Amino acid sequence: MLLLTACTGSSQTTQQTVDRPEDLVFPELNPIQVPEVHEFEYNGITFYLVEDNEVPLINLNTIIRAGSWMQPMDQVGLASITGEVMRSGGTASLSADELNEFLESRAASMETSFGLASGSARMNVLKEDFEELLPVFIELLTAPAFPEERLELTKTQRRSGISRRNDSPAGIAGREFQNLIYGRQTVFSNTLEYDHLNNINIDDLKAFHSNAVNANNLMVGIVGDFNVEEIRPVLEAAFGEIEQGERNEFDFPEIDYTFESTINFIPRSDMNQSIIRMGHIGGLRDNPDYTALQVMNQVLSGGFSGRLMQEVRTRLGLAYSVSGNFGSSVLYEGQFFAGLSTAGETTAQAIEATISEIRRLQDELVPQSELDDTRERFLNSLVFRNASRSSALNEQINNAYLGLPFDAFERYVEEVREVTPEDIQRVAREYLRPDAMHILVVGNPDLVGNQLDQFGDVREIDITIPRPGSMETREVVSGDTEAGREWLDKMAAQILSSGPVDEIVYEGRMQSAQLPGGMIVDVVMTYDFANGNLTQMLNTPMGSQAIKLENGRAFLEAGGQRQDLPGNFADNLRNLLDRHYASIAMKASDLSPEYLGMQSKNGLEYAVILLSDLEVKLWLNPETSLPDMITFDEFNPETGGDVEVVSMYENWNEKDGVKSSWLQTQEVDGSEMSRFEFSTHSAN
Amino acid sequence: MKFTRLLSVALTAFMFYAVQPASAQSVEAFEERVTEFTLDNGLHFIIIERDVAPVASFVTFVNVGAVNEPVGQTGITHIFEHMAFKGSKTIGTTDIEAELPLIEAMDDAYRAWFRESTRPNPDEEMLEELWEEFLRLQEESQQFVVNNEFSMIVDREGAVGMNAFVSADETAFFYSLPQNKAELWFKMEADRFMNPVMREFYLEKDVIWEERRDRTDNNPVGRLIEEFNSVAFSAHPYKNPPIGWPSDIDAVTIEHTMEFYRTFYVPQNMTIAIAGDVDPSEMKRLAEKYFGPMPVAEDPPQLTVVEPAQRGERRFTIEDQSQPILMIGYKSVDGNHPDAAAIQLMSSILFDGRTSRIYRSLVVEEQLALQISGFNGFPGDRFPGLFVILGVPNQGVEVSEIESRIYEEIERLKSGGVTESELNRVRTQARAATIRGLTSNMNLALEFARKHTRTNDWRTIFTDLDRLNEVTPEDIQRVAQTYLIPNSRTVGAIVTRQDDEATASID
């Protein structure tokens, strides 16, 4: 349509004399040489071969019918780690280091991997090295060594990966959107956690490998500088040794998807941009509407000529990258999504502009000329399908692996020619639900403000990385509940001599490992138990600074500025409030204390009470019944492990009906982190 | 449109492919398939015949990069690159006669607003009026725009991979077409570089702002790199980000951009390479027909800035909402320097592949680092740049720990040298990587155009490989001792912002 307007428009101006690119007459296209794919079967394995003598290389790929769909849900990562350690650990005859030197001195490569629905072992070698390297490849495929230390290396690296997974906002958006569509911890959206790694051992890798690699699970594709007749016996000899076995069947769970509209926000205070994803479940390849949906995709998001790019980027200048797709997979439902990133201030405008393009597909017929352009783009670029010899090979292997007809693509091309504007509108109305999308925004709360409220109730997604152990049921420690109750009530009575209080305020001085060397500053701590708020006000020579927990959010106030603190920070502050001895005393009757007996620490005897609701232990002084220590384990995201936090309370004083400690010291893993010396407290 | 040579390139894992035949053989093989000619106006063409499929790739390579930008106009190379997709006097418009004066008026209005907004005490009321006037003219000029017509036309004819990039060193535009549509490329390409129109200029700057947010502002590695280059270089424009400093992106106007275009987009500063199933004589005929009329112009100015010797180590730290990352750079040499080959091989011995020294020690044995990579020629290699190292520590490992281990490995190389077998291994890999890269039309066209631009001869691709053969273990040791010295070093790191600090100090 745009092209037509351009032509009619310009014919009335000075451009009549200018010849248009549309007027060019092109010569016939040179003939397309479709490479011949030779196919044969041996030992239950199908081989696909294409000769290509442009460079003296041979490229072999073995497709393995196995993937992460087979791994237990508490061992996320097992398939991909198996693929990694298969290669990194070497074989029985070549250690990891020997294998690396052997390959790199020949500038050869061998790699192995497992994805969701398939695995692969591949090598790329000089043709003269092929026969020497093939047995090494077969050994790597069938008998990898799986040494323990390489699994440990991989686990260390994956742990680092987990700790880094929230560094990239785009990474957060992709992961969390997937979770919204498929649910958390499913075959299709399984984020690796520390606990999964702890559940994986070397025997699990060996078992996964042995279920994966047998002749009946393999297909082999090979392209390069060889002669089919000459190489066939070499392949038969090498792959003929592989034992037959049970063929894995695809076993993907049904996706139980309910359409709903949700607005999800992930706050990141360091961003000036919002990363936006919106959409819902997609479809299956095996659907009579597949082709019409693909053409619809192209109209909406087919590169620079697609509507999203035209409108949201070019006309409105709201984004650099905009994309979308109605995903249709052979084995499971894909996802429909549109995504972009835009300045924090224009978040709502960009969401609206994107939704309105989705709606337009339903509300208006795509003009015939726009459809023709879209179709021409596709048909004219088909010649690139055979731009390399390996592309024909890959297409054929892919169809065979997934059980598609060998001419699936040809049929698709024929169907594309038949799609009408009415078809596109019909499938857009049937499959797109702009009123029932999950909308996800990762962005800066200060810039996004209340922009999202217009789309519905905003819910915040917590992306705190779960610490190890949080996914399994906690170890059950059984203590004496009756004695526990007795001890806790005694403690409560000691601390609160005249019943509950709303607030305790401490004044004094503190020093901390985070303050410059030995600096001591004035501090006022306000524990507002009634409202669940907490304030730490510091007066330093550089000015005053307040850290606050208010209405569940944490922030920092200094020099008239307010800065949001991340979600895990708020969690930590809430814990401080909940684990304060006065707070424990006030809710003593709601807790389930367990007496673990008398235990000694630092040479003194204490009555130890476990409060599993709060994950803390109270170390009560048997003479005073006061908590001289409160301990708990805290996850340190930097080390990926737990650290023990010990709070010590001394110098107890009673005032305003509350007994409080005026000397409080906190140690983390044995080293002192902070020390508060209060001169007074007040309570009301 | 994207930048190459961002460090993320170096972050990707090692993959290499092999070919060992003598390089001379390859030069000869290519000689038969390569045709070169230069038009009278100075525009050079390289045609590489490759008939694997009836398609061809087209590359326009311009010897202008972010290093060539005037003061206060960083990012202008990239802005013009974006504008080159906006069409011409005949593409992208319904009425050029009406459109051009409006574009000029819009630019005048923007400059009036910008002048006022950057005065010490801008008059707010006036500012608002000027901005309204600018918006009015922008909207008025929009009515003649045919959205993305340039890309619609070539896409419709089956173009694939249409894109462009700008780096510190260079600019390139490229896409592939069915081979019988070569004339379309000639017509569209000559037109956009002979008759550019700065339509939708300020809207496109909004897109560029988003690109900057995507790549730099909201990306920890992007932030680190931008800071790093600005610390490492004192005088040389390698200190500037190709996307431009924020205030410069705001400051650049259509007037500046057209001046930049007239200065650098001249025939002798451009090289065109075409690879695929094409007939060289037909390409020559079309080149003369479409690019022949490109006017002869003065040579663009040469960059004469030379980075002065560094007087001591430079260090900085960014506290960030990200896990730690370490970056180290040593002042090094340009790509044509006699020591470049030895430095390249030294870098491979240290960092490339599973047999490299630092991968083996820091990643595998000591498990200190998740990833470490290094290479020479950052942010470019047209001028002396940096030998740069990027390290990602494992969980719980301090950046200082991997930093000192890297220095120990460097010292080990300086004092103990390298073995002949290490050297052979990385030489084989370098050769293999080069040849393996020459098996697609697009890579061929890009690589031939780049080498011609840098060295005036595409054959350097192969003679560079010969230079690798001449490097001895002593050379490697010597370049390590010469260049990897603390005085010429810059070290930058991201350390995780301790928001959690306060937690520990509250009780």
Image (cartoon, rainbow, N blue to C red):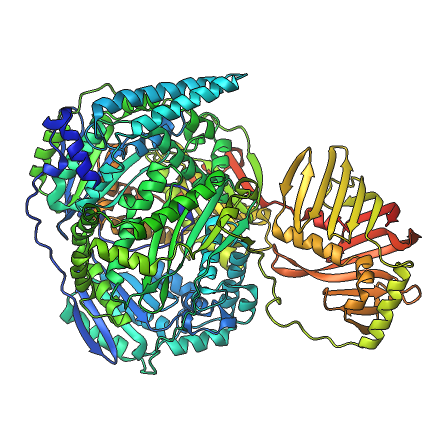
* Left or right of residue A132, residue A605 in this image: right
In which quadrant of the rendered image does the N terminus of chain A lie? top left
Is residue B460 visible to us here? no
| Residue at figure coordinates x 36%, y 71% from the top left | A140
* x then y, percent, for residue A264: 51, 53
Of residues A115 and B153, the one nearer the viewer is B153
Q: Is residue B491 visible?
A: yes
Q: Is residue B368 left or right of residue A657?
A: left
Nearest to the observer: residue A147 or residue A403: A403
Q: x%, y% of residue A477?
A: 73, 75
Residue B98 lies, with reference to residue A498, above or below; the image says: above
Location of residue A289 in the rendering, given as x and y in whole percent from the top left corner: 26, 63
Q: Is residue A476 above or below residue A543?
A: below
A133 or B148: nearer the eye? B148
Task: Residue A111: give x, y in percent of width and height.
Answer: 36, 63
Please tell me how many numbered marks the rendered image carries: 0
At 49% from the left edge and 32% from the top edge, which residue is drawn?
Answer: B232
- Comparing B213 with A541, the one in front is B213
Residue at 41 percent across and 50 percent down: it is B349
Q: Is residue B254 above or below residue B472?
A: above
